[in-house]
Image (cartoon, rainbow, N blue to C red):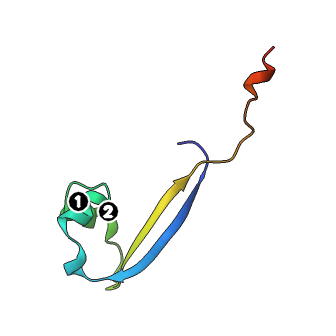
Amino acid sequence: MEEGAIEIDSIETIGFPDITPELARESGFLGVLDLLKVAKHGRSVKIYLVRFHYVRPRGKRKDWRKSS
């Protein structure tokens, strides 16, 4: 993966009933069990839904008008 950054859109506390098949698929998982295998770690009982997006690095644009 190229360099870049992750920008957080939102963080909210949710409960197990909020973890639906639709949420799992929207998050890129096959289903709820697939999501929980990756997301569950530790003994904590708090669940956070973190929405984010990838931001590409800003680079110098090549000026196509100045081709040699």
In what element is the residue under mark 1? helix
As drawn, the label of residue 49 is: none
| Residue 49: % across, % down | 37, 74
Distance of mark 2 from mark 1, alpha carbons? Answer: 7 Å
| Residue with the mark numbered 2 | 38
Task: Sort mark 1 into few (<14), some (14-19) or many (20+) by Cα contacts within 10 Å.
Answer: some
Left or right side of 59 for 36: left
Q: Are marks 2 and 1 in contact (CB under 8 Å)?
A: yes
Work out whether 53 lies above or below 13: above
In what element is the residue under mark 2? helix
Amino acid type at circle 1 is: Asp
Q: Please tell me which residue is depicted at 29% across the width and 59% down the height of the picture.
A: 26
| Residue with the mark numbered 1 | 34
Q: Nearer the viewer, residue 3 or 58?
A: 58
Amino acid type at circle 2 is: Val
Q: Would you identify the image quadrant in which residue 31 lies?
A: bottom left
Q: Nearer the viewer, residue 31 or 55?
A: 55
Q: In which quarter of the image is the C terminus?
A: top right
Q: Please tell me which residue is depicted at 26% across the width and 67% down the height of the picture.
A: 36
| Residue 34: % across, % down | 23, 59
Residue sticking out furthest to the bottom: 45
| Residue 48: % across, % down | 38, 78
Q: Would you identify the image quadrant in which residue 14 lies?
A: bottom left
Q: Which of 40 and 16 is in front in this view?
A: 16
Q: Please tell me which residue is depicted at 61% across the width and 46% down the height of the picture.
A: 3
Work out whether 68 lies above or below 34: above
